[in-house]
Amino acid sequence: MKKTLISLSFFVSLFIFGCSMYNVVNYDANQRMRSINLGMSKNEVIKAMGKYYIVNSASKDSQENLKEILAYKSDVNEEYKLVFINDKLTEWNRVFTNCNEHSHKPTPSSTKNN
């Protein structure tokens, strides 16, 4: 029984830690983005922005050029998406995320007094 409880505790802790790592927020992402320039290597960008990023996508085109998109979450409901082609930064975008996009928004007909 004790072994089972220890094993269960370990796996629950691992699950919680793993989920929290996915949602790492880069509190100074806006400040760090000021040092990012197109043409930088992927390693240079990671050194400037930090190692806590999400690989948003990766693919190869018909000429075998590798395209990767890394995402950094900031603390103000936005995400920076950085596009690399063959390890060089070619584009970046700031995407605003809406935490409440699935919440109920009243329509004019639902707020009328009958």
Image (cartoon, rainbow, N blue to C red):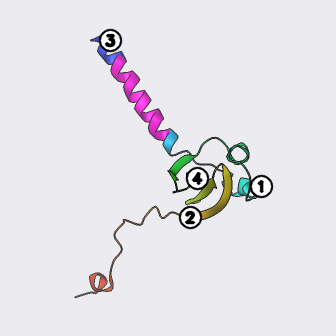
CA distance for labels 1 and 2: 18 Å
Mark toward the start of the polypeptide (3 vs 1): 3
Q: Main secondary structure of the magenta part?
A: helix
On the rendered image, what quadrant is the C terminus found in? bottom left
Q: Quadrant of residue 106?
A: bottom left
From the viewer's perspective, is residue 102 above or below residue 110?
above
Q: Residues within 10 Å of mark 4 (few under 14, many from 20)?
A: few
Q: Quadrant of the N terminus?
A: top left
Q: Which disc, if any, is residue 95?
A: 2
Would you name the residue on which mark 1 appears?
A: 35
Question: Are the residues tagged 2 and 3 within 8 Å (C-beta)?
Answer: no
Residue at 36% x, 16% y: name it.
Answer: 6
Decide which of tag 1 and tag 2 comes sooner along the chain: 1
Q: Kindly identify which residue carries mark 3.
A: 3
Q: How dense is the environment of label 2, judged by Cα within 10 Å: few (below 14), some, or many (20 and up)?
A: few
Image spot of residue 70 (x, y percent):
58, 51
* Mark 3 vs 1: CB contact within 8 A: no
**Callout 4 touching callout 1 (CB < 8 Å):** no
Rendered location of residue 87, percent (x, y): 66, 48
Circles 3 and 4 in contact, beta carbons < 8 Å: no
Which of label 4 and label 2 is nearer to you? 4
Name the N-terminal-most of marks 2 and 3.
3
Q: Residue furthest right?
A: 35
Name the residue beneath numbered marker 4: 65
Position of 18 relative to 24 (above/below)? above
For label 3, the SS is helix
Of the two numbered discs 3 and 1 in the rendering, the one whose residue sits closer to the viewer: 1
The alpha-carbon separation of the residues under discs 3 and 4 comes to 50 Å
| Magenta segment boundaries in residue numbering | 7-20
Name of the residue lying farthest toward the front: 63
Which of the two discs, 3 and 4, labels the residue nearer the N terminus?
3
